[in-house]
Amino acid sequence: MGQKMDVRTGRHVVHALHAHLVFVTKFRHAVFTNAHLTRLEAIFRDVCADFECELAEFNGEANHVHLLVNFPPKVAVSHLVNSLKGVSSRYMRREFPELEQHYWRAKRLWSGSYFAGSVGGAPISVLKQYIENQTRPT
């Protein structure tokens, strides 16, 4: 494999689970400045810590953000996403009242949808070939 995997251990599990998450602002409004993104990163790190996850990487643009999250198998990605979006929306709307002009109709910072993709490890084709080549007992 050649690359160092970020393997974590639990009491009965060894895992290396990473998800690439993308959240888009409501109505795709371009609302974020550098100050907003800096605060969002801090909020996301705190929420991840509450879930025993690690925010490995974060960045964004004016109308969306990207997160790379390392998470344990006991965490449902959908629950993590709900908390990340809900908590960040609540804090951002309270701490940055100027954002209200962008969400006044919906009372939400984020679109209801999101992207979640699994990342890391070997490509699917390599895994398929590895599984196909297992010596099956006769």
Image (tube, rainbow, N blue to C red):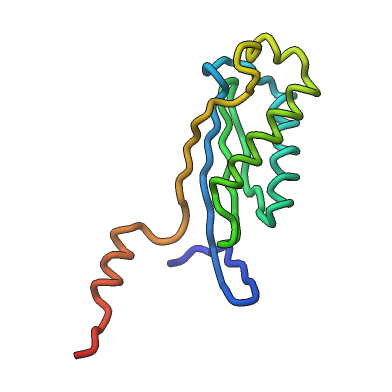
Q: Which quarter of the figure has residue 40?
A: top right
On the image, which quarter does residue 45 sit in?
top right
Instruction: Name the outermost residue toward the front.
Output: 106
Q: Where is the N terminus found, in terms of image quarters?
A: bottom left
Is 73 situated above or below 39?
below
Residue positioned 46% across, 66% down in the render = 2
Q: Residue at x 47, y 37 (%)?
A: 115
The vertical placement of 93 against 2, above or below, is above
**Residue 92, image quadrant:** top right
In the rendered image, the residue lying farthest to the top is 101
Residue 36 position within the rendered picture, expressed as x and y whole percent measured from the top left: 72, 25
Residue 35 versus residue 85: which sits nearer the camera? Answer: 85
Describe residue 54's horizontal placement relative to residue 136 as left or right.
right
List x then y, in percent, for residue 16.
54, 63
Residue drawn 46% across and 51% down?
A: 118
Left or right for 88, reference 119:
right
Residue at the (71%, 35%) spot, across then down: 87
